[in-house]
């Protein structure tokens, strides 16, 4: 849930969006508490080993991931935006528990990339927090790359989140992580066609054993060689189908905009 999907057949995109809207509405009506969780396959993260991870919550439920990049800003996917109040939970491992390490902070402002028009192109957003996070061993920001650099293919990367364990599987409340490998631009374009824009997107391949992103992981990180390279955006409806690469927004492309927003007085 709460993860955008695309079909390789563009004629079905409208129907996919309609199904997503209906599914989201049903989830918001019936879910109670933070019940969304985990990467499919992969492994459970060592508790609090990724102190930059954020859970975006709407009406008390996890809907997306995010990354704390400054004590007052979280980076996530633009399609995670919901109407009404949203809360960021930091310092969490198990979302079903009221861990003493957790910090719950309301979102004061949603800052979508200007060229994002509600679709999955330029699917990135900054969240200005209502107050600063308290940094400690459970909550730390992730340092952004200093400058943009092209990432090559066949690089092993880590993904993490509280998304579902598979397209039809049960969920877990604990943070999980998986390993995905960057894929060449021609191979990405061969599958996603015009939906994939190599200028500001990265795509990856994966195995069911090593795990990967699924529903509820949107907005989470793609970390390659200890650098934040991507923000989780979309995949096929069956998130664990290796035929369809997973797609991320390329952080390096957005660095000038991010830097400008971080230095804007809100």
Image (cartoon, grey):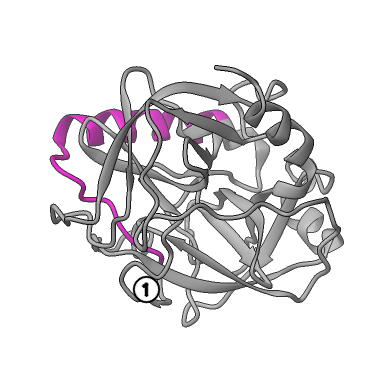
Residue 37 as seen in the image, left or right of residue 205:
left
Q: Is mark 1 on a helix, strand or loop?
A: loop
Instruction: State the extent of the magenta-drawn residues as a range.
Output: 14-39
Which of the 4 image quarters holds residue 53? bottom left
What residue do we see at 80% from left, 57% from top? 190
Which of the 4 image quarters holds residue 27? top left
- Quadrant showing the C terminus: top right
| 18 or 125: nearer the viewer | 125
Residue 25 as seen in the image, left or right of residue 261:
left
What residue do we see at 83% from left, 68% from top? 152
Residue 109 as seen in the image, left or right of residue 45:
right
Q: Position of residue 180 (x, y in %)?
A: 60, 72
Compared with residue 161, is residue 256 higher up or lower down, i.e. above or below?
A: above
Q: Can residue 216 be seen in this view?
A: no
Residue corresponding to mark 1: 45
Compared with residue 209, is residue 224 higher up or lower down, i.e. above or below?
A: above
Q: Where is residue 132 in the image (x, y as percent from the top left)?
A: 40, 35
Q: Position of residue 60 (x, y in %)?
A: 20, 36
């Amino acid at each position: 849930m709460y993860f955008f999907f695309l079909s390789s057949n563009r004629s079905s995109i409208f129907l996919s969006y309609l199904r997503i809207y209906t599914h989201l509405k049903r989830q918001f009506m019936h879910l109670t508490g933070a019940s969304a969780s985990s990467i499919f396959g992969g492994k459970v993260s060592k508790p609090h080993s990724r102190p930059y991870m954020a859970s975006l919550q709407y009406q008390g439920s996890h809907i997306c991931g995010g990354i704390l990049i400054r004590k007052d800003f979280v980076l996530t996917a633009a399609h995670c935006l919901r109407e009404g109040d949203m809360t960021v939970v930091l310092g969490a491992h198990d979302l079903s528990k009221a861990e003493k390490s957790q910090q719950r902070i309301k979102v004061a402002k949603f800052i979508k990339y200007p060229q994002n028009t509600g679709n999955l192109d330029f699917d990135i957003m900054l969240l200005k927090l209502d107050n600063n996070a308290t940094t400690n061993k459970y909550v730390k920001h992730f340092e952004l790359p200093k400058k943009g650099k092209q990432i090559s293919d066949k690089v092993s990367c880590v993904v993490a989140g509280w998304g579902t364990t598979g397209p039809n599987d049960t969920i877990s409340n604990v943070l999980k992580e998986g390993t995905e490998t960057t894929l060449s631009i021609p191979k990405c374009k061969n599958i996603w066609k015009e939906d994939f824009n190599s200028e500001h997107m990265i795509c990856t391949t994966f195995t069911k054993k090593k795990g990967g992103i699924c529903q509820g992981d949107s907005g989470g990180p793609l970390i390659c060689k200890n650098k934040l390279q991507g923000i989780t955006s979309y995949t096929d409806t069956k998130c664990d189908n290796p035929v369809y690469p997973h797609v991320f927004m390329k952080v390096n492309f957005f660095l000038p905009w991010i830097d400008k927003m971080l230095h804007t007085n809100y």
